[in-house]
Image (cartoon, rainbow, N blue to C red):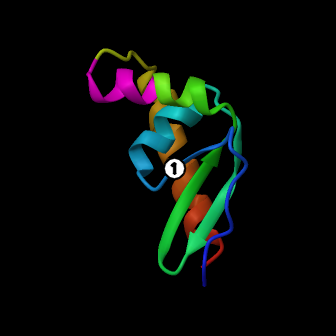
Amino acid sequence: MQMQPSPQNNFLTKDLYLGAILYSKQMKLEGVKRDGRVCWFEFLDKDACENLQKEFFSKSLEVNAKEYADAIKTLKDLVFSEM
């Protein structure tokens, strides 16, 4: 099954932990797309997500640990609830 293209201003990631960062930073989750066994998290506001991604990978992003842990659980629930 081929994944449908996303609107240009949406941000896609298959990285659960990056997705959890974005979710915990209040980025709007548009949905979870599946491409075979791979799940892609789709977020609105590509520019804001890309900025958070840069901060995440440069280790300069601060996040509330409880919100981050809750976000991981939420995204896992979304992935496994539809299998």
Residue at the image point whose x is 64% and y is 59% from the top: 32
Numbered label tally? 1
Quadrant in which the N terminus appears: bottom right
Which residue: 42% across, 40% down? 18
Return the residue nearer the eye: 51 or 30.
51
> In the rendered structure, which segment of residues is drawn in magenta?
52-59
Q: Quadrant of residue 40?
A: bottom right
Residue type of the residue flagged with mark 1: Lys
Residue 38 location (% of width, % of height) = 47, 71
Q: Is residue 77 placed above or below 52 in the rendered structure?
A: below
Callout 1 crowding tier (Cα within 10 Å): few <14, some 14–19, many ≥20: some
Residue 61 location, quadrant? top left
Q: Is residue 24 magenta?
A: no
- Pick whichever, 7 or 72, lies toward us: 7
Residue at the farthest front position: 8
Name the residue carrying label 1. 73
